[in-house]
Amino acid sequence: MAGLTTEVRMAIADLNAEYAACLDERRFDAWLELFTDDCVYKLQPRENHDRGLPHATMAFGSKDILRDRIYAVTQTLFHIPYTTRHVIGWPRVWIGDDCLLAAEANYMVVRVRDNELPELFSAGRYLDRIVRNDGRLKFKERLCIFDSALIPDSILYPI
Amino acid sequence: MAGLTTEVRMAIADLNAEYAACLDERRFDAWLELFTDDCVYKLQPRENHDRGLPHATMAFGSKDILRDRIYAVTQTLFHIPYTTRHVIGWPRVWIGDDCLLAAEANYMVVRVRDNELPELFSAGRYLDRIVRNDGRLKFKERLCIFDSALIPDSILYPI
Amino acid sequence: MAGLTTEVRMAIADLNAEYAACLDERRFDAWLELFTDDCVYKLQPRENHDRGLPHATMAFGSKDILRDRIYAVTQTLFHIPYTTRHVIGWPRVWIGDDCLLAAEANYMVVRVRDNELPELFSAGRYLDRIVRNDGRLKFKERLCIFDSALIPDSILYPI
C-alpha cells in the first residue's frame, strides 16, 4: 500500500459501498455514473478467468452499452422479480503497472424473491482499475469474477 | 463525504463492528449502551419501508423499551435457541438534513441452531442517525430494513 | 481504540483482506508469510471455546506445522475439490494485556464445488494477536472460532 494515503484507500471502500447501494436500491442512473465513459465491465466465471478464456456471462465495453443493458433488464425483459443485497469486503489497493489505481475485493450477494427466503446468489471477487474523473473516483474497469460456474436460474442485473 | 474526517468515518465502522460483536456474543448490556436514551430502533421489511407503510416487525422508542425487549427474549420467551453472526459492509456516511451524522450499511446475518448447519437468516441494510454522547458515538436511530418479507420461523433478537 | 492510529487500524483490515485473498486464490506460500514463525493457529467450534474446552478441529503451534498442513491438503489428501470465498467484517482493534495488538472480526465463508451452487460453509469470528515483524503486520495468533458445531462434510483448508 506504499504511497497510498488512508484517504484514497477509504475512498475506494466508499466507492464499493456506493456501488452496492446503487444496485441494491435500483438507483441505476447513479450506478452508471460510477463508471468512466470508456469503461469495461465483465461478469465472468472464475474457471474461465483463471484459464485466460475469453467467454464472459456479461461483457460491456462502454458506459453506453452498460446503459443499454440496464434499459433492457428494467424495461424489456420478462422475468421473476428479485432484489439483491451486496456485502463487499475491505479492498486490497495498489498502483498497477499502468499507473492506475488497482483494487480487489471479495463479495457475496443475496437474492430475494417475493415470498421466498433470502438465498445466497453469488460469491466472488471484483478486480478493478480506478481513475479520478470529474473530481471523483470511477471504475475504468470492473471485472466481476464469480466462483461458481453454475448460475442459479439466471443473472439479469450486473453483480 | 465532504467535511468528514477519516477518523469519524472509521469510528462509524467501529460502531457497527461493536454492534455486531455485542449481539453475536450476547453482551446485551454493552449493546444497549450503543444507543442514546431516546433512541429509535425499528426492524422493518423493505417492502413496507419503501412504500412508507408504518408497520414494523419491531419498533422501540427508547433505550428502556429496548432493555425490556432484551429482558423478554432472554428471560421469558420459550424458543429454540440460536446464535447469530453479523457481517456488515463498509458504511456510507454523510451529514443529514438534521445536522446529525447519517450512515447506511448493508448487512448479512447467519443463524446457527444446535446440531444444524449455518443458515442465511437475514440480509438488508441499516439506516442510522448517529450522535456523539458521553464522548462516544451512539445510535439515536437505527432502522434495520430487511429485504425478505418472509421471515424464517421468527426473529427474536434484534438484528 | 485509544492510541491506535487510523493507519494501524486500516493495516489490520488490509491484513485480513490479504489473508482472505491468499486462501481463496490458493496462494498458500503468501498465506504462510502472514504468520510469525512461532505462530498459533486454531480452528475451534464456538461451544468449546466459550466453555474453555481445549479440543480444536485444527491446532497448529508454528509456521512449520501450518506449512505441513498445507502440503498435506494440497499434495496428499484425496477429497472433492472446492474453492472458498471469505468476506470479513471491519475489525475491532485494541492493545491487549500482553501489549500486543489484539483484533477481532466476524467472517463468512462460502464454498463452491464443481457444478454446484455456492453454499454457506462457515460463519464465526477471528480472535487475533498481531505483531510487527520484518516491517509488516503478522499473526502471532489467530483463533478461528466457528459458530456451528456441525461441519458440512469436512473442513480441509484453514478457514
Image (cartoon, coloured by chain):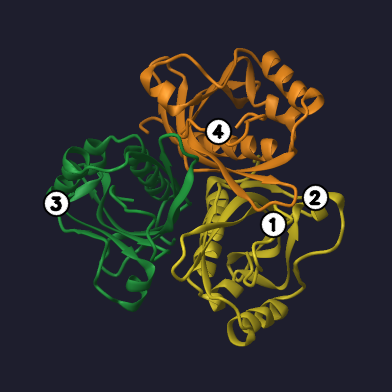
Chain colours: A green, B orange, C yellow
Which quadrant of the figure has residue A22? top left
One can see residue C155 in this view: yes
Residue located beneath label 2 in the image: C97
Q: Is residue B113 left or right of residue A92?
A: right
Q: Are marks 2 and 4 in contact (CB under 8 Å)?
A: no
- For residue B66, the mark is none
Q: Is residue C4 left or right of residue B93?
A: right
Label 1 – label 3 distance at C-alpha: 46 Å
Q: Nearer the viewer, mark 4 or mark 1?
A: 4
Residue at x-position 80% and y-position 23%: B76
Residue located beneath label 3 in the image: A65
Chain letter of mark 1 equals C
Report crowding for label 4: few under 14, some 14 to 19, many 20 or more residues within 10 A (C-alpha). some
Report crowding for label 2: few under 14, some 14 to 19, many 20 or more residues within 10 A (C-alpha). few
Q: Nearer the viewer, mark 2 or mark 4?
A: 4
> Element at badge 4?
loop
Quadrant, the N terminus of chain C? top right
Label 1 – label 2 distance at C-alpha: 13 Å
> Element at badge 3?
helix
> Element at badge 2?
loop
Question: Label 1 amino acid?
Answer: Asp
Residue located beneath label 4 in the image: B151
Q: Is residue C56 left or right of residue C11?
A: right
Q: Are marks 3 and 4 in contact (CB under 8 Å)?
A: no
Of mark 1 and mark 2, the one earlier in the sequence is 2
- For residue C128, the mark is 1
Chain letter of mark 3 equals A
